[in-house]
Image (cartoon, rainbow, N blue to C red):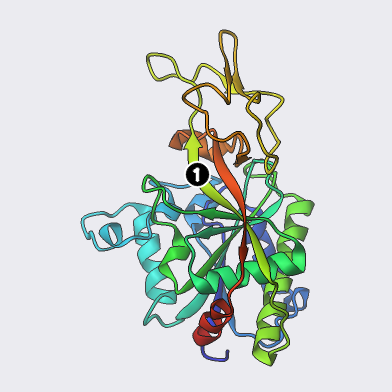
Amino acid sequence: MSEKKLLILGGTHGNEINAPWLLKQWQNKPSLIDTHGIKFFSDIGNPLAMEKCLRYIDMDLNRTFYSEILQDLNNNAYEVLRARSINHIYGKGGSKQSQFVFDFHSTTANMGTCIVLYGRRPADLAIASFLQYELGLPVYLYEKDLTQKGFLVEYWPCGIVVEIGPVAQGVLCERIVSQTLLVLSTIFNLFHKLKKQLFTFPETLIIHSHLRSVDFPRDGNGNINGFVHPNLDGKDWLPLNKDTCLFSGYDIEEKFNESKYSLMGSEVPLFINEAAYREKGIALSLTRKETIMTDRKWVDELISLM
């Protein structure tokens, strides 16, 4: 583990200030977290956006990590330059090359503390299963949606997003900071246990697998003309039924079992009314809860990266 380092990132979005604040405190007071001697780097993903308390300057940094953008030298958007810099420093062949990246975010949605995975990479699944076993964290598995790509963690051999909420954008909150500190401490403890072969590997992993995202209702001109139904707002992680109203407004009421929304009736909504997703045409995402058997090969893959 002395050679393959962890990268801890906060502030990938500049108005998510709790993780960056904690990273700064940690830098000034290293005893905040027992790292068990595990080597790591920490950094702020989007420092200029953070100075201005904006999600981004030119484009979403967490949608820029794919080859077509990074290799397009005619694209000089601030976040593209920043993505190239992060990759140059911490990516393959970089001066601070890291095999593992943990990207800490906050959300305005009532998601609590959770893990987000992008695809089913074995090492990612192993870490998610350990964190779920230790802390009981739910896991959102985001895959099979080609409209959203370029997530930072996908560009590393192993990468996990930690989302913590709810908290308003630009607001420093003790509850969010404390949860971030708890997850960070647990991550280092897990790597310590892996190094010493003292870990307990759970038999199952519960995931919420992405099905599709749902936009707000819109009028003929494309303007939003309804809002998340008040009986649904804030009910992340709770299964829908066929009579659930998704949206309401002064002239509309749209139920889940209407033709354009109807699925099975047991889907689980996540990121309900996330403020940052309105620009992406997402009012909420629908998932299906699954229990999958863990695989020792996941751990083998994780250990091979160490």
- Residues 245 and 95: in front is 245
Identify the image quadrant of residue 82: bottom left
Residue farthest along the top direction in this orientation? 251
Q: Amino acid at mark 1?
A: Leu
Q: Which residue is mark 1?
A: 211
Residue farthest along the left direction in this orientation? 74
The answer to whether one can see residue 24 in this image is no
Q: Count numbered badges in the picture.
A: 1
Q: Residue at x 72, y 25 (%)?
A: 231
Q: Residue at x 41, y 75 (%)?
A: 91
As drawn, is 84 to the left or to the right of 194? left
Q: Position of residue 178 (x, y in %)?
A: 77, 59
In the depicted structure, whether residue 162 falls above or below residue 275: below
Q: Position of residue 204 (x, y in %)?
A: 67, 66
Q: Position of residue 180 (x, y in %)?
A: 71, 61
Disc 1 residue crowd, few under 14, some 14–19, many 20+, Cα 10 Å: some
As drawn, is 215 to the left or to the right of 114? left
- Give the SS element for disc 1: strand
Q: Residue at x 71, y 82 (%)?
A: 199
Q: Position of residue 94 (x, y in %)?
A: 39, 80
As drawn, is 146 to the left or to the right of 288? left
Q: Quadrant of the C terminus?
A: bottom right
In the depicted structure, whether residue 5 falls above or below residue 203: below
As drawn, is 198 to the left or to the right of 125? right
The answer to whether one can see residue 142 in this image is yes
Q: Quadrant of the N terminus?
A: bottom right
In the depicted structure, whether residue 173 falls above or below residue 97: above
Identify the image quadrant of residue 169: top right
- Residues 132 and 265: in front is 265
Q: Residue at x 36, y 82 (%)?
A: 93
